[in-house]
Image (cartoon, rainbow, N blue to C red):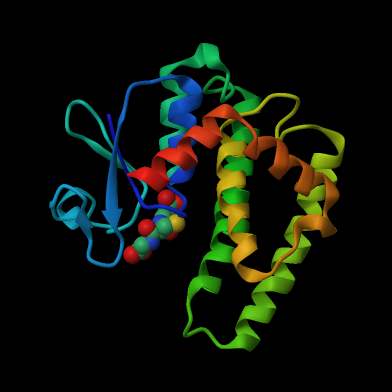
Amino acid sequence: MKLYFAPETCSLSPHIVLRELGLPFELVRVDNKTKKTADGRDFLAINPKGYVAALELAGGQVLTEGPAIVQYLADLKPQAELAPPPGSWERVRLQEMLNFIGSEIHAGLAPLFNAALPEQVKTILKEKLVRRLGLLETTLAQQDYLLGPQFGVADAYLFTVLRWTAFFAIDLVQWPAVAAYMKDTGARATVKAALAAEALA
Ligand SMILES: N[C@@H](CCC(=O)N[C@@H](CS)C(=O)NCC(=O)O)C(=O)O
């Protein structure tokens, strides 16, 4: 498998999951501005959406959308228990959480990277994020990870997007359980290895 990634982006989430599962994979860096891969290919020919993450399978199929990729990966190795079994109620809860992260946290933070966005709009987005972080604080004050006592694919995704708060002066100390979760997750060997590999690639 090949994971097309760009540093400091949401592709870190499937990258962490690949390492948690111990699956063999190749990292291919994408320049998000030029849409060229590090090995000189046209990324748009690989993923016409033009964004990371994209996972290329051995048969040549390319899977996109972070929440779909991490579930696909987790199901390759169910014994690792990074996702509840397909068809179970717990799996529906995972999908609920992945959608919350995608539409409320990821999509809430991503526009803040846009220098052209007026400050007023950024303030409105940040106020909404503060409310969403309050919800996460309630969950993480009761349990170590998003879905219970065990790290899973939703945690890889949340960790990835919450790292961006550092770029926008959103200090997570306001949410102590979230801050502790970020520290613990950041200390995982797989997470450290993923960040180191992305810095080198
Ligand atoms: N809906 C997609 C969004 C992916 C996405 O926003 N990727 C960003 C990095 S976090 C990107 O590559 N943006 C470059 C672009 O849109 O040109 C997903 O959840 O995987």
Viewport quadrant of the N terminus: top left
Residue drawn at point x = 63 percent, y = 42 percent: 97
Most distant residue in the front direction? 200
Most distant residue in the top direction? 79
- Is residue 24 toward the left or the right of residue 36 in the image? right
Q: Position of residue 119 (x, y in %)?
A: 61, 86
Q: Position of residue 101 (x, y in %)?
A: 60, 50
Residue drawn at point x = 65 percent, y = 74 percent: 125
| Residue 148, picture quadrant | top right
In this picture, is 8 found above or below 131? above
Residue drawn at point x = 65 percent, y = 88 percent: 120
Viewport quadrant of the C terminus: top left
Q: Is 27 or 126 nearer to us in this picture?
A: 27
Q: Report the number of numbered marks.
A: 0
Q: Position of residue 179 (x, y in %)?
A: 77, 48
Does any portion of residue 67 appear in the rendered image? no
Quarter of the picture for ligand 1?
bottom left
| Residue 54, picture quadrant | top left
| Residue 61, picture quadrant | top left
- Is residue 110 toward the left or the right of residue 125 in the image? left
Q: Is 141 or 132 nearer to us in this picture?
A: 141
Residue drawn at point x = 78 percent, y = 42 percent: 180
Q: Is 177 or 107 nearer to us in this picture?
A: 177
Does any portion of residue 181 appear in the rendered image? yes
- Is residue 170 toward the left or the right of residue 5 in the image? right
